[in-house]
Image: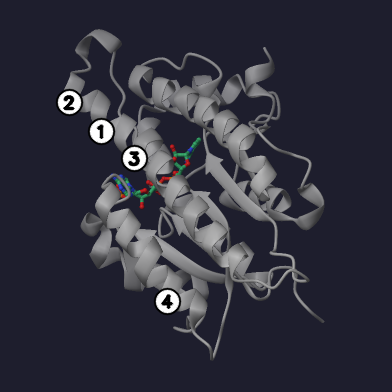
């Protein structure tokens, strides 16, 4: 049976992170070929993560590429040369139709103690990174769409960026992080508006706490963690598989009218 994403390539920024790797696993299980982008400082975690998530990853189907998502020249080079060449490989062609922005950084301290330097550590991977990767993805998608004959339709383009509950409410000590994630919602609305007519939808997902290295850092204080848990109507944090399921839902062909939306996967935390 043909899988929904066979012949399609999914690019995942933050692809070896706690959420990114499980999102990648889900898309691959549904037939997608993968490009996992990782930051230079994560290089020593790539092999163990791939082995843990994919058991014995097929190098033809799972490519891990080092890429600084906050550096435009580096991103443009990786998308327009390396990823383009992988997609155009005649032995195993694939269409670059999915981008997931799942890299991120969080720091926790009161606003008045947050230096501009610390704020930038949040803004760069959480907002500027998706800005740059999405632009590069748009150009790559359009380039491949233009190579098709007039009778062929490209697979639908999908950009899914992981925002946060912090995009919607003020989380104590998360000022710079909240600002970066609220900005990501604004960016996504503009992508949806400008690129919908080019066959690409853009949406965000706003998870509550989902236990990953990032969450363990942000919620290290046991008292704060338990207080937050008590404020979530479903009474628990999310698991990465629930975020991956929401991403995969937005990637589907039948989700093509969902554009510029935010899907909250927060157990109802932000409704009150
Ligand atoms: N987990 C949650 O509770 C939660 C809730 C809401 C939203 N989110 C969002 O979901 C996304 C994924 O988070 P996660 O929980 O999977 O965290 P994670 O496990 O820390 O994964 C994030 C990945 O991004 C990488 N990264 C950090 N700075 C980067 C940079 N400058 N350039 C490129 N990559 C960089 C991290 O590398 P290092 O590990 O080396 O830093 C890590 O591999 C983030 O945008 C996060 O804000 C997470």
- In depth, the one of 197 and 236 nearer the eye is 197
Where residue 127 sits, quadrant-wise, is top left
Sequence-first disc among 4 and 1? 4
Q: Are marks 2 and 1 in contact (CB under 8 Å)?
A: yes
Q: Quadrant of ligand 1?
A: top left
Residue beneath label 1, please?
Answer: 121
**Percent of width and height locating residue 255:** 78, 48
Sequence-first disc among 4 and 3? 4
x 48%, y 13%: residue: 170
Residue beneath label 3, please?
Answer: 125
> Judging from the image, what secondary structure is the residue with disc 3 in?
helix
- Label 2, residues with CA under 10 Å away: few <14, some 14-19, many ≥20: few
**Percent of width and height locating residue 6:** 68, 75
**Percent of width and height locating residue 217:** 34, 37
Q: Alpha-carbon distance for marks 4 and 1?
A: 32 Å
**Percent of width and height locating residue 163:** 52, 34
Q: Would the CB of label 1 be found within 8 Å of ligand 1?
A: yes
Q: Are marks 4 and 1 in contact (CB under 8 Å)?
A: no
Q: Alpha-carbon distance for marks 2 and 3?
A: 13 Å
- Pair 4/1: label in front: 4
Look at the image and tell me in which quarter the C terminus lies: top right
Left of 98 or right of it: where is 35? Answer: left
Q: Would the CB of label 3 be found within 8 Å of ligand 1?
A: yes
Sequence-first disc among 2 and 3? 2
> Judging from the image, what secondary structure is the residue with disc 4 in?
helix
Q: Alpha-carbon distance for marks 2 and 4?
A: 37 Å
Q: Alpha-carbon distance for marks 2 and 1?
A: 7 Å
Please, is residue 105 above or below residue 44 in the view?
above
Residue beneath label 2, please?
Answer: 117
Left of 52 or right of it: where is 66? Answer: left
């Amino acid at each position: 049976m043909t899988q929904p994403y066979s012949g399609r390539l999914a690019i995942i920024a933050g692809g070896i992170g706690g959420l990114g790797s499980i999102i990648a696993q889900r898309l691959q299980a549904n037939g997608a070929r993968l490009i996992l982008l990782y930051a230079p400082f994560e290089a020593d975690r790539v092999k163990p993560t791939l082995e843990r998530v994919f058991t014995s990853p097929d190098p033809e189907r799972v490519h891990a590429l080092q890429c600084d998502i906050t550096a435009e020249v580096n991103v443009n080079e990786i998308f327009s040369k390396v990823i383009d060449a992988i997609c155009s490989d005649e032995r195993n062609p694939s269409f670059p139709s999915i981008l997931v922005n799942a890299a991120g950084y969080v720091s926790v301290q009161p606003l008045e103690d947050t230096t501009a330097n610390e704020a930038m550590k949040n803004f760069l991977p959480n907002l500027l990174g998706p800005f740059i990767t999405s632009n590069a993805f748009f150009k790559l998608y359009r380039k491949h769409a233009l190579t098709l004959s007039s009778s062929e339709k490209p697979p639908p383009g999908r950009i899914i960026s992981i925002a946060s509950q912090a995009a919607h409410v003020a989380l104590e000590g998360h000022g710079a992080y909240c600002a970066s994630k609220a900005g990501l919602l604004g960016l996504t609305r503009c992508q949806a508006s400008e690129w919908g007519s080019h066959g690409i939808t853009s949406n965000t997902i706003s998870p509550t706490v989902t236990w990953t290295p990032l969450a363990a850092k942000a919620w290290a204080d046991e008292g704060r963690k338990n207080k937050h848990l008590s404020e979530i109507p479903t009474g628990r944090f999310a698991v990465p598989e629930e975020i991956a399921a929401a991403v995969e839902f937005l990637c589907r062909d039948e989700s093509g009218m969902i554009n510029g939306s935010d899907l909250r996967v927060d157990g109802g935390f932000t409704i009150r």
